[in-house]
Amino acid sequence: MPIVSDSRRRLCCALPLLLCLAPSLQAADLAADKAKAKMCAACHGIDGLAKVADAPNLAGNGELYLARQLQAFRSGERKHPQMSVIAAGLGDDDIAAVTRWYSSIKVSVELPE
C-alpha cells in the first residue's frame, strides 16, 4: 500500500513540472520545424504565403493534407518540375517537420463589405 501512495505522490509532483515544460519543448520543436521549412521559403514563403505565381499558399493547411501532397510528389503520384525533385530528397522526418510548421500558421480571412 505505501508503494502506491508513494507512486501517486511522485506523479502528482512530476505532472505539474511536465505541464510547465511542455510549451517550451513545443516551441523548440516548432523552431526546428521552421528551420527545416526554410528550404520551402523561396516559393512558398516562410509564412506560408506564396512568393511565386504558380506556388500554392501553404499556411493554415492541414498537416495530414500537406504530408499527403509531399508524399505524392515524392512517390511520383503527383508531378511538378520543381516539387518532384525537391520531394524526392525529403525523408519522413523532413515531411513531418515542414507540415507541422505550415499547418501551425493561423490564417484569418477578412470579407469585403
Image (spheres, rainbow, N blue to C red):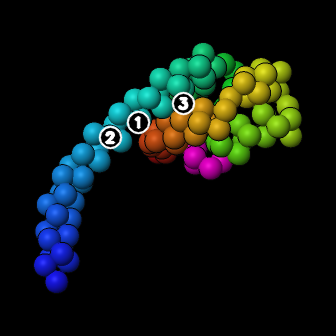
Label pair 3/1, CB-CB below 8 angstroms: no
Residue, disc 1: 29
Q: Which residues are magenta?
A: 60-65
* Local SS, label 2: helix
Any mark on residue 25, and which?
2
Any mark on residue 55, and which?
none
Residue at the image point whose x is 49% and y is 36% from the top: 101
Amino acid tagged 2: Leu
Residue 102 visible in the shown view: no
Amino acid tagged 3: Gly
Residue, disc 3: 48
Label 1 Cα crowd, 10 Å radius (few <14 / some 14-19 / many 20+): some
What quarter of the picture does the N terminus occupy?
A: bottom left
Q: Label 3, label 2: how many angstroms apart (C-alpha)?
A: 23 Å
* Local SS, label 1: helix
Magenta run includes residue 64: yes
